[in-house]
Each structure stands twice: as structure tokens, then as C-alpha cells.
Amino acid sequence: MSKLIVFCGHSGTGKTTLSKKLSKKLKIACLHKDSLKEPIYENMGCKSLEDSIKVGYCSIKTLFNLAEDQIKLGVDVIIESPFNHIESVEIFKKWIKKHKIDFYCVICSLNEQLRMNRWKNRLKIRHKSHHDKERLQKFSQGINNGFDFEKMPEKKIRVTSNDPVPKLIKKILKEIG
């Protein structure tokens, strides 16, 4: 039985950092939506936020295909993306039933002020495909995807990423067993 560990949460809550650290600790491959999105955006000569959204959608679909291929092979996998749409929940439920996977959902959260500070600090270092300046404007105006991550299936591991990373990894490992 494959183990699928999903890292989800709003942008800037530490999903990528935590999933990479856990991947290294467990020696399990970790698939990141942004690792697909960024080169596709660049290679296609994209420029706009609208392009970013389209490429992001294609990237998430590709991420799901890659993850399911590994699950079918019986390989453990970690995947990371916001997964903040009900379609993701339905896909995970289908996989749990169809492939009988051991499913864990790590829900990352962070105080909104700290999250905004992270966003502002990464404006200069993140890839242009994210259009963070435009998205930050929406967030600062209170426009955010209010997705309820409690809708995610199976075992949920809630972490607040203002705690030190080693402490969070220890908590996740304890929950996974």
C-alpha cells in the first residue's frame, strides 16, 4: 500500500519548506506544483497573471498525473500545492478508494500578519511566474480563497509554521508513525 502525504495550505504558510525537509528525512520523492509551473511558464513565453493562472491549472493536473503514476506503482510520494479547491478533495477521495492508499494531509497555517510579511520578503526572490506583487495586492485587500481545509479526507496533521522547522517535522513524523 502506497503512502501519500499531501501538504496543503494558503501561499506563504511553509508548505514547500516543510515538504522538502520531510522528503529528505523520509527519502520519499516530493512533487511540487511550482517545480512544474515555473519552467512551463518560462518555456511558453508567458507574461501575465492570466497566463500564470492557466499554467498553474495545467501544472496541478500534471502533478496529479505524476503522483497517481507513482501510487499505481506502489511508491510512497509527497505532493505539495495549495490544493484549495474541492476538485482536489474529490481526487484524493477517489485515490484512497481506488488505490487503497495510506493518506495523510498536512495542513499548513500561519498567522495572517506573519504570512503577509513572508509574502513581502519573497517578492524579489520568487520566480516571476507567480506574479506575487499582483496577488499580494488582492491579499492585502482581504481577497483570499476561503477554502476550508477541514474538507480534506482522512488523517489531517495541522501545523502552524511559525514553529521551528525541526519541531514541525518531528510532529509530522510522530503523526505518520
Image (cartoon, helix red, strand yellow):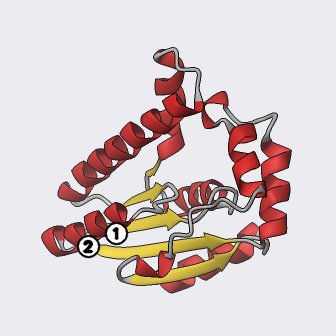
Using the image as rendered, state which of residue 133 and residue 121 is in the foreground: 133
> Which residue in the structure is indicated by mark 1?
89
Name which residue type carries label 2: Lys
User: Which quadrant is the N terminus positioned in?
Assistant: bottom left
Question: For the residue labelled by badge 1, is the local secondary structure a helix, a strand or a loop?
Answer: helix
Considering the numbered disc 2 on the image, is that residue within a helix, a strand or a loop? helix
- Circles 2 and 1, Cβ within 8 Å, touching? The answer is yes
- Under mark 1, the amino acid is Val
Is residue 85 positioned above or below 163 on the image?
Answer: above
Q: Indicate left or right for 29 with 89 as reference.
A: right
Q: Which residue is mark 2?
A: 93
In this picture, is 72 found above or below 43? below
Q: Position of residue 142 (x, y in %)?
A: 72, 62
Residue 129 coordinates in the image, percent (x, y): 60, 31
Q: Residue at x 61, y 62 (%)?
A: 10
> Label 1: how many residues lie within 10 Å, few (<14), some (14-19) or many (20+)?
some
Q: Position of residue 13 (x, y in %)?
A: 68, 63
In whole angstroms, how far apart are the C-alphas of marks 2 and 1?
Answer: 6 Å
Q: Residues within 10 Å of mark 2 (few under 14, many from 20)?
A: some
| Along the line of sight, the residue nearer the viewer: 2 or 140 | 140
Judge whether residue 36 can be spotted in this image.
no
